[in-house]
Amino acid sequence: MLDISPALLLVAVAVFLVMLVLLNKMLYRPLLEFIHNRDSAIANDYENAGKNTSDINAYQEEAERIIREAKAEAVRVRADFIQEFKDAALKKVEQRKAELEEEYTAFLEGLDKERVELKSGLLAQMPLFKESVQSKLNQI
């Protein structure tokens, strides 16, 4: 019925073993090495992604710090500008006040001069007024 040939069986086992060795050497080892390398690359990428996340957080914190400093600097510059503007305006007001004070003093001096001149002119004209009043009274 079934004839088992020992030579053929040995050849089949030999071909099978040779095939196992060849497949192991040419297919399984490179395939396992590729899978191992891929797993290592994925783990490395995952680790780098974690580092990138921490780097991003650090950069974001630094950016927020820079923005806070810039806002503080802007507030300081604005306050300095406002103070300088107020100082300049106050200086102009004081200067104008001094000018007006000088003009007022000069006006008062001129007014005093005119008062004295008017008084002396009236005093000089007083005898004429007295005569005029006397003549008017005499006419009445």
Image (tube, rainbow, N blue to C red):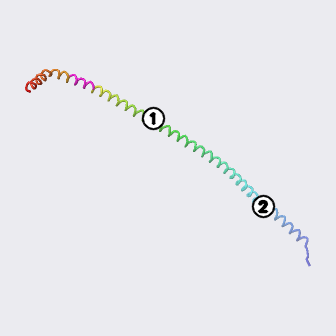
Task: Specify the quadrant that holds the N terminus.
Answer: bottom right
Query: Which residue type does callout 1 highlight?
Result: Gln
Residue drawn at point x = 65 percent, y = 49 percent = 53
Q: Who is closer to the viewer here, 32 or 76?
A: 76
Q: Residue furthest bottom?
A: 1
**In 3D space, how far apart are the residues under numbered discs 1 and 2 (Cα atoms)?**
81 Å
Residue 83 disc label? 1
Res. 24 image quadrant: bottom right
What kind of element bears circle 1?
A: helix
What kind of element bears circle 2?
A: helix
Which sits earlier in the primary sequence, circle 1 or circle 2?
2
Residue drawn at point x = 71 percent, y = 53 percent = 43
Task: Specify the quadrant that holds the C terminus.
Answer: top left
Residue 20, given in percent of the width and then of the height, sits at 82, 63
Whether residue 115 appears in magenta in the rendering, the answer is: yes
Residue drawn at point x = 37 percent, y = 30 percent = 94
Q: Who is closer to the viewer here, 70 or 35?
A: 70
For the image, the number of numbered tags is 2
Chief secondary structure of the magenta span? helix
Q: Which residue bears the numbered disc 2?
A: 28
Q: Would you place residue 22 above or below residue 103 in this image?
A: below
Q: Which residues are magenta?
A: 108-116
Query: Which residue type does callout 2 highlight?
Result: Tyr
Residue 3, given in percent of the width and then of the height, sits at 91, 76
Residue 123, given in percent of the width and then of the height, sits at 17, 21
Q: In the image, is 62 to the left or to the right of 42?
A: left
Residue drawn at point x = 82 percent, y = 62 percent = 21
Residue 47, given in percent of the width and then of the height, sits at 69, 50
